[in-house]
């Protein structure tokens, strides 16, 4: 049997970091806004007639083997930690060869690991006979990925991976709920440029430091998170009105607020790319993910997207080719 699964990455527009439990509980009305990208994480599982487990990452060039009766060793593996911990969680009773790869650059900050987590759950759950309901997938993904990164994982990245399209993720006392935003996907494509800086996201730019300061009662941090919440509320309203001027104004106002929260969110090269883009038709910029490298999303003025792409390309940035992903998690068996 061959099982193939995939899930899209995402570009986050507003509300990042506030999606980490329990931070959003202190900010009523907290939400995040993002859209899914056609750059997908892929998992292929081919069953074997023996008890060998072969785990492989095409992107990292890592492959190793174990056996079904030694599956507990995967809980301690550090080579392919997310893959290994997912396999250990599902504890399949048959041998297989699993290959994972991503269409997104490494360290891009567009939720490649979260997309891979959802794709792994979809494939492995199919392998073990659909042991878990689909409405459990996001909680499983967040819990397993937390054991990998060893700090609390935010929730927003799993929703575009699971559902696709444009989302507002509402973070409420009664739970987390995803709202589909009926935004023109073609307009998003026309308006946004996403570039990879060539610098993988710096692991030192960690939400954990922000998390600790907030929990410790830092008043300045609390106020910054209030503004993060407000920016997401404004972005949702702007997208639903198809008001791109308001969307740009929201992104412009949020950019320095994010830098106050984490001054190292941008590198000198990223600052230079933002300056070049703004001088050539971009109206606002959003560092994807935790920053310190990775990708930047630029909202462009009407008709100026080619100018922005050209300016960024001249600076050596990689212009990503993408569409808004209409579908989230996809799983097939043959």
Image (tube, grey):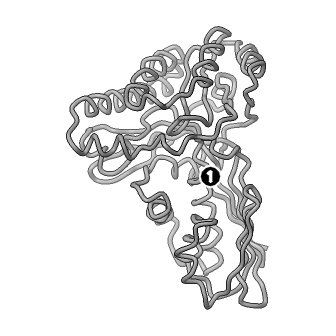
Question: Does residue 4 show up?
Answer: no
Question: Does residue 112 show up?
Answer: yes
Describe the element under mark 1 as helix, strand or loop: loop
Q: Is residue 147 left or right of residue 43?
A: left
- Image quarter hosting the C terminus: bottom right
In depth, the one of 279 and 12 nearer the eye is 279
Instruction: Choose top left, top right, bottom left or bottom right for residue 190.
Output: top right
Please rate how many residues cluster around mark 1, counting C-alpha atoms within 10 Å: few if below 14, some from 14 to 19, many from 20.
Answer: many
Q: Tell me where residue 119 appears, x and y as whole percent.
A: 63, 61
Give above or below for 181 relative to 267: below
In depth, the one of 6 and 89 nearer the eye is 89
In depth, the one of 43 and 125 nearer the eye is 43
- Image quarter hosting the N terminus: bottom right
Q: Is residue 295 left or right of residue 24?
A: right
Q: Tell me where residue 152 appears, x and y as whole percent.
A: 39, 54
Q: Residue at x 63, y 28 (%)?
A: 188
Q: Which residue is mark 1?
A: 328
Q: Tell me where residue 174 appears, x and y as whole percent.
A: 28, 53
Q: Residue at x 31, y 47 (%)?
A: 172
């Amino acid at each position: 049997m061959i099982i193939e699964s995939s899930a899209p990455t995402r570009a986050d527009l507003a509300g990042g970091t506030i999606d980490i439990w329990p931070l959003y509980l202190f900010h009523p009305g907290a939400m995040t806004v993002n859209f899914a990208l056609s750059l997908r994480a892929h998992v292929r599982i081919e069953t074997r007639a023996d008890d060998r487990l072969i785990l492989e990452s095409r992107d990292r060039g890592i492959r190793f083997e174990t056996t079904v009766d030694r599956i507990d060793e995967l809980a301690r593996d550090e080579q392919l930690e997310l893959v290994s911990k997912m396999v250990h969680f599902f504890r399949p009773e048959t041998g297989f060869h699993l290959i994972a790869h991503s269409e997104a650059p490494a360290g891009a900050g567009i939720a490649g690991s979260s997309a891979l987590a959802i794709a792994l759950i979809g494939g492995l759950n199919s392998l073990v006979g659909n042991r878990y309901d689909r409405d459990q997938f996001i909680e499983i993904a967040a819990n397993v990925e937390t054991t990998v990164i060893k700090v609390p994982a935010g929730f927003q990245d799993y929703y575009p991976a699971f559902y696709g399209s444009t989302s507002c993720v509402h973070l409420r006392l009664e739970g987390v709920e995803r709202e589909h935003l009926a935004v023109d996907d073609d307009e998003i494509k026309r308006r946004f440029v996403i570039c990879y800086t060539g610098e993988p996201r710096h692991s030192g730019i960690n939400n954990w430091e922000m998390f600790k300061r907030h929990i410790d009662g830092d008043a300045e941090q609390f106020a910054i998170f209030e503004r993060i919440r407000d920016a997401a509320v404004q972005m949702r309203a702007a997208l639903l009105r198809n008001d791109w001027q308001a969307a740009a104004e929201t992104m412009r106002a949020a950019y320095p607020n994010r830098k106050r929260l984490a001054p190292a969110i941008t590198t000198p090269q990223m600052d230079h790319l933002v300056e070049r883009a703004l001088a050539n038709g971009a109206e606002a910029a959003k560092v994807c993910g935790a920053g310190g490298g990775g990708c930047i999303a630029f909202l462009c003025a009407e008709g100026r997207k080619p100018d922005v792409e050209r300016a960024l390309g001249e600076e050596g940035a990689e212009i990503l080719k993408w569409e808004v992903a209409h579908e989230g998690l996809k799983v097939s068996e043959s």
